[in-house]
Amino acid sequence: MSRLRKTLAGAAQPVQTSAPAPMRRVLAGGRRGEEVVLPVLGRVWIELPGARAWQEMEAAVRREMHRLEVGELGIETAAQYEAERALRVLAMSVRDADHHDVAFGSLEDWGELADNDVIIPAWHAFEDVRERLDPVTTELSAEDAIAIGVAVKKNDPSLLRAFGVVKLSAWLASMGSLLLSAATPSSPSSASPSES
């Protein structure tokens, strides 16, 4: 074997280190969550799911909606999708307050719970924990909101990209009702005489 082949063969071996990779150190730091008290249920731990778990949950929601023949996500089906998503998120995220590895209830348990006085507060508690602990769900500053509005009026895609997905999403969410009312076509009775 040539010296080059020996060198290349040696270079192909992974470098062994005694220290864990940086991501492993972060993951070992513990779960992201908080203890909360929910009506009827009492003390629980609400844990934020990781990206992989969230993707799997979203796929499961789509499969269930397909199985139930609900149709594609749209204005008419949004409530059914959200209800299914809420049940799955709660089954995944609400944990025993003293034993975080133990789910508070299964998906079937949450699905059998027809009491909105329990499900809705649990969903709101999850959203509150997510807002506090998830760095992606930050408030949009007034300055950013104005600057994004200016970039939209200028129709400047490169400037809009500079704000990033998180800020643009927050801006769109804050503008939702205005955007929907502006996108609604006018009725024939409100058309001007020149349009008739």
Image (cartoon, helix red, strand yellow):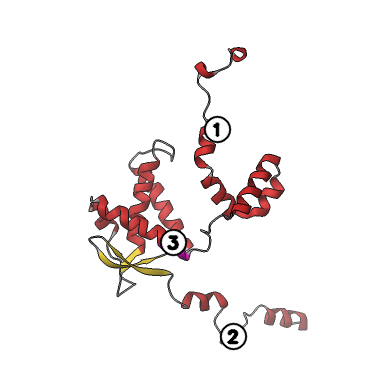
Residue 130, magenta (yes or no): yes
Marks 3 and 2, how far apart at CA: 35 Å
Among the two numbered marks 3 and 1 on one chain, the one whose residue lies closer to the N terminus: 3
Who's the residue at 56% across and 85% down the image? Answer: 19
Tell me which corner region of the image, top left, top right, bottom left or bottom right, holds residue 88: bottom left
- Percent x, y for residue 120? 31, 52
Assess whether mark 1 and mark 2 are in contact (beta carbons under 8 angstroms): no
Q: Is residue 14 left or right of residue 58?
A: right
Q: Nearer the viewer, residue 136 or 65?
A: 136
Kindly identify which residue carries mark 2: 17
Position in image of residue 107 (x %, y %): 29, 57
Tell me, for residue 130, which label it has, or none: 3
Q: Which mark is residue 13?
A: none
Please name the amino acid that badge 2 sits on. Answer: Thr
Quarter the N terminus occupies: bottom right
User: In which image quadrant can residue 150 be found?
Assistant: top right
Q: Is residue 68 above or below residue 49?
A: above
Read off the magenta span: 129-133
Amino acid type of the residue tagged 3 in the rendering: Arg
Q: Quadrant of residue 98?
A: bottom left
| Outermost right residue | 3
- In the image, 175 versus 159, the foreground residue is 175
Element under disc 3: helix
Give the structural element (helix, strand or loop) at label 1.
helix
Left or right: 132 as drawn, with respect to 22: left
Mark 1 = which residue?
A: 182
In the image, residue 111 lies at what x, y percent?
26, 52
Instruction: Identify the mark nearer the N-term, 3 or 2.
Output: 2
Which residue ends up furthest to the front in the rendered image? 142
Q: CA distance from mark 3 to mark 1?
A: 31 Å
Q: Considering depth in this image, is 43 or 147 the residue closer to the camera?
A: 147
